[in-house]
Amino acid sequence: GAVVSQHPSWVICKSGTSVKIECRSLDFQATTMFWYRQFPKQSLMLMATSNEGSKATYEQGVEKDKFLINHASLTLSTLTVTSAHPEDSSFYICSAREAQGNGELFFGEGSRLTVL
Amino acid sequence: QKEVEQDPGPLSVPEGAIVSLNCTYSNSAFQYFMWYRQYSRKGPELLMYTYSSGNKEDGRFTAQVDKSSKYISLFIRDSQPSDSATYLCAMSVSGNQFYFGTGTSLTVIP
């Protein structure tokens, strides 16, 4: 299947700093990428839908100024957690749908953020 | 009512058993159905993809979609300890928006 790479897989930062997470589709073009947050032993919580070349669509309750999403190319979307606080500590996962695909959705490996 | 319902388990089976995982859904317009396996601290891995109704088999895994009953299943034959993971079902109408089950935690005991 198609490969989605997410980086970094693990990051620890101090409170108040910003952290950028990258999501790349390695062998296909993705017009749409999704960003999720996952708490321990819980399912995926959709944060936003990222469309190449346009503004991301955020889910209700997700602060767009806190979680900045940029989808500048067909293979890269980034999530920046700005002024991170300990409550932002979580597992963040991206997924991508192939532009010319048949509806399959592929996930990155996830990024574990710990804010001290 | 949630769009997708999935029993969270946990489910424990002995090695070699046949495992049956299920999801029900309410939106009859869903036509893309997927099963993912997620190991702890990893992203979900696509196991099976089915478009519309029917069965699909891949090795020890079989996915079934019954649109009349709004019910999908994943069967794992000859289960192995390495199959121990959380299994998520997912569905979509057009591939633009996806709905996920809560995941079923499976443990295969050697």
Image (spheres, coloured by chain):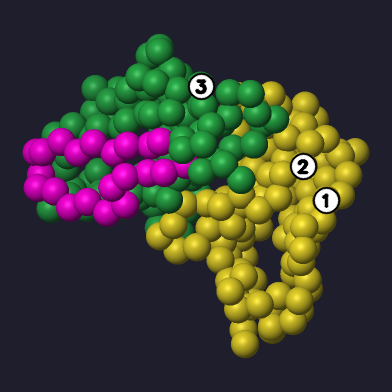
Chain colours: A green, B yellow
Q: CA distance from mark 1 to mark 2?
A: 7 Å
Pick the front one: B99 or A101: A101
Q: Quadrant of the N terminus of chain B?
A: top right
Q: At which x and y percent is residue A65?
A: 24, 22
**Residue B50: numbered disc:** 2
Disc 2 chain ID: B
**Above or below, comparing residue A77 to residue A21 in the picture:** above
Left or right: where does residue A71 sit relative to residue A2? left
Identify the residue at horizontal 66%, vertical 77% (top origin).
B80
Q: Quadrant of the C terminus of chain B?
A: bottom right
Name the secondary structure under disc 2: strand
Asked if the residues shown at circle 3 and circle 1 are in contact, with their CB atoms under 8 angstroms apart, the answer is no
State whether the magenta stretch is mostly helix, strand or loop: strand
* Amino acid on which the number 3 mark rests in the picture: Thr
Magenta residues (range): A4-24
**Residue A31: numbered disc:** 3
Query: Mark 1 and mark 2, same subunit?
Result: yes
Disc 1 chain ID: B
Magenta span contains residue A7 = yes
Left or right: where does residue A67 sit relative to residue A36? left
* Amino acid on which the number 1 mark rests in the picture: Lys
Quadrant of the image occupied by residue B16: bottom right
Identify the residue at horizontal 56%, vertical 52% (top origin).
B45
Pick the front one: B25 or B62: B62
Asked if the residues shown at circle 1 and circle 2 are in contact, with their CB atoms under 8 angstroms apart, the answer is yes
Q: CA distance from mark 3 to mark 1?
A: 28 Å
**Residue B56: numbered disc:** 1
Q: CA distance from mark 2 to mark 3?
A: 22 Å
* Amino acid on which the number 2 mark rests in the picture: Thr
